[in-house]
Structures are given as C-alpha cells and as structure tokens.
Image: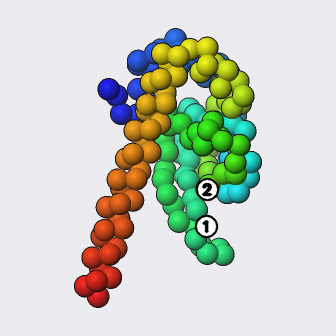
Amino acid sequence: MSHSLQDLAVLHPEGWAAMLALGEHRTLAPQAVVFADREPGWHLFVVKAGLIEILKETAPGIELRLAILEAGAVFGEGALFEDSLRSATARSFKEVELIEIPVTALREYLASNPAFALDFYRLLCGRLHRIMADLDADLKTLHRRLTNA
C-alpha cells in the first residue's frame, strides 16, 4: 500500500485527474492566507507548485509551524468529514499554485468512484496515524525532558 496522497496519481491516474478537474486553479502571492484557523471549511486543496505552511497560533501573536507542504500535497481534508471550523491556518510560503476543490463536488465524486474513494480514505487515515505517532513521540520526549529537569 502506498503511503502518501500523491500516490493516488499513480494508483488511479484517471481518478486523480478527474478529482483535480473538479477544482479551480488559483495562484497566490507569498504570505497569502489560503484559509484561517476557525474559518468554515468548504474546500480541499492540492498544491500544484510552491510551498504552503500550516500554522497554529499558540498564544496571541505566536505561531507554531506544523508543516510545510510541497507540490502534490493535499490539505484541508478535514472539511470532507465534518462541517466544522478549520483547525489551523494555511498560508503560502512562496508564490503558490493551488487547485481548490469544493467539498460537495468531491463527496459526490468519491461516492460514485468507490475504488478511488477507498484508497483516498486509506491514505488519509495513514497520514493521520503518522501524525499521531509523531505527536506521541514528541510528548514522550517532552515528558522525559520535564522529568529530568
């Protein structure tokens, strides 16, 4: 089984192309906000070129960079699963080209293409599993540092 969402382009080239065709191309200048923390999420995004940084404000005026995403990365997928607010801010690091896919169109596409949907959801779950494993390792390191301080 593949390990990244970009691998969908290899597993399902026609499905990947069809998914991308659901969206609109956008070009953003450096430091442009794609979406802000606590905003409603109505789109999933694919980075075509450039870099996106995912940020979380930990205190007023203090941002923690959670990730830098490169071409091929998919982000904003939380909007697929629930109609809730964004959990972080996404901002262009450099000039970036994105594909912005409406969640309603993507849900319909996934419902009508079960093989593609299954691999799509498996890869999302795998990414979540890796994030949780990294968080667990970071928390254990923090605990050791605090215990030995």
- Please tell me which residue is depicted at 66% across the width and 51% down the height of the picture: 86
Mark 1 and mark 2: span between their CA atoms? 8 Å
Residue positioned 67% across, 57% down in the render: 37
- In the picture provided, is 55 more to the left or to the right than 132? right
Judged from the image, the secondary structure of the residue bearing numbered disc 2 is: loop
Place residue 19 in its image quadrant.
top right
Local crowd at mark 2 within 10 Å, few (<14), some, or many (≥20)?
some
- Mark drawn on residue 57: 1
Query: Disc 1 residue type?
Result: Glu
Type of amino acid under label 2: Ala
The residue closer to the viewer here, 57 or 143, is 143
Label 1 or label 2, whichever comes before in sequence order: 1
Q: How many marks?
A: 2
Q: Quadrant where the C terminus lies?
A: bottom left
Residue 4 image position (x, y, % from top left): 40, 34
Residue plotted at (69% across, 36% down): 43
* Label annotation for residue 106: none
Disc 1, SS: strand
Read off the residue under disc 2: 88
Badge 1: few (under 14), some or many (20 or more) residues near its Cα, within 10 Å? few
Percent x, y of residue 118? 47, 23
Closer-to-camera residue (143/58) = 143
Along the viewing direction, whichever of 27 and 135 lies nearer the viewer: 135
One can see residue 33 in this view: no
Lateral position of residue 2 relative to residue 47, left or right = left
Image location (x, y in percent) of residue 108: 67, 21
| Residue 59 place in picture, x, y as percent | 61, 75
The image shows residue 127, relative to residue 33, as above or below, that is above
